[in-house]
Amino acid sequence: MKRLNFLWILIGFVVIQVVSLKAAAQLTLPSVNLGFKTTENPQEVVSAIKVVLMMTVLTLAPAILIMMTSFTRLIIVLSFLRQAIGVQQMPPNQLLVGLALFLTFFIMGPSFTEMNKNGIQPYLAGKISQEKAIDETLGPLRKFMFSQTRPQDLNLFVRLSKMETPRTLADVPTMVLVPSFVISELKTAFTIGFIIFLPFLVIDMVAASVLMAMGMMMLPPVVISLPLKVMLFVLVDGWSLIIGSMVSSFG
């Protein structure tokens, strides 16, 4: 009986495989050809160069998202918050990165909309040239970075680049603006992180002092302070305060 059941299962498996192969044979998949060929048409050469440039931009997209938006400040402050509370793996890194990413989309929403409206869509419609599209696309990002960059950081990289002092902000190259913006974001994020650390540091000190006074030196202070810090953070609705303050800091 067992052999008969096994035989029927084997026959059914073979039938399923045959049907799947027939169904796959009836599908027509598009073919993709990658290669090089000689051409005498300059337009084809220009199109190939545009494809290469587009692939380069897509490769640099993660770096652009991290270094030219609000992502840097958000992820550093959230990491400081986790360290201040004392929970090393909670929330996990994936959750913090995801939260920082969607907050970045929320904060940069107006800039992204303006970039799409003034630069990307007109270029796709053939209304503006590629150079004009690049300028219109970078414009909102540059405006955002200038609003968050400290003058002393900008002057530092202007001096390091050994270029002439720009008369206006429009004369500042993007390659000078980006590192200036990142340095300013790091300083702002560390300042916010220091402020976040203070109340939790007080709790740690109080817990250590109470245990010392009670003679319970063998009990680690973190065992007492960690639940107190988590309770304090929940009671004051800490997530709303932190997220609201960070979003408002970009206003």
Image: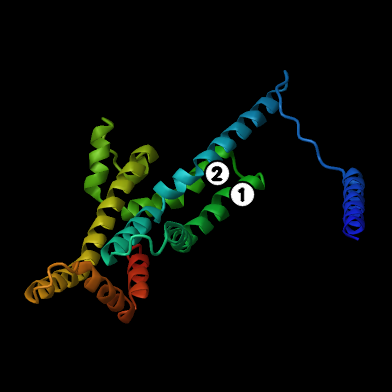
Residue drawn at 89 percent across, 45 percent down: 21
Residue drawn at 40 percent across, 64 percent down: 91
> Along the polypeptide, which appears first: circle 2 or circle 1?
1
Residue drawn at 73 percent across, 20 percent down: 37
Q: In this view of the protein, which residue sits in the foreground, 30 or 7?
A: 7
Position of 38 relative to 142 (above/below): above
Pointer 2 and pointer 1: residues touching (CB < 8 Å)?
A: yes
Position of 69 relative to 58 (above/below): below
| C-alpha distance separating marks 2 and 1 | 8 Å
Evaluate whether residue 209 shows in this view: yes
| Colour convention of the picture | rainbow
* x and y percentages locating residue 1 in the rendered image: 91, 61
Residue count near mark 1 (Cα–Cα under 10 Å), binned few <14, some 14–19, many ≥20: some
* x and y percentages locating residue 102 in the rendered image: 48, 61
SS at mark 1 in the image = helix
| Left or right, residue 143 beside residue 127 | left
Circle 2 residue: 133
Query: What quarter of the picture does the C terminus occupy?
Result: bottom left
Circle 1 residue: 122
* x and y percentages locating residue 218 in the rendered image: 15, 67
Q: In this view of the protein, which residue sits in the foreground, 246 or 218?
A: 218
Q: In this view of the protein, which residue sits in the foreground, 77 or 11?
A: 11
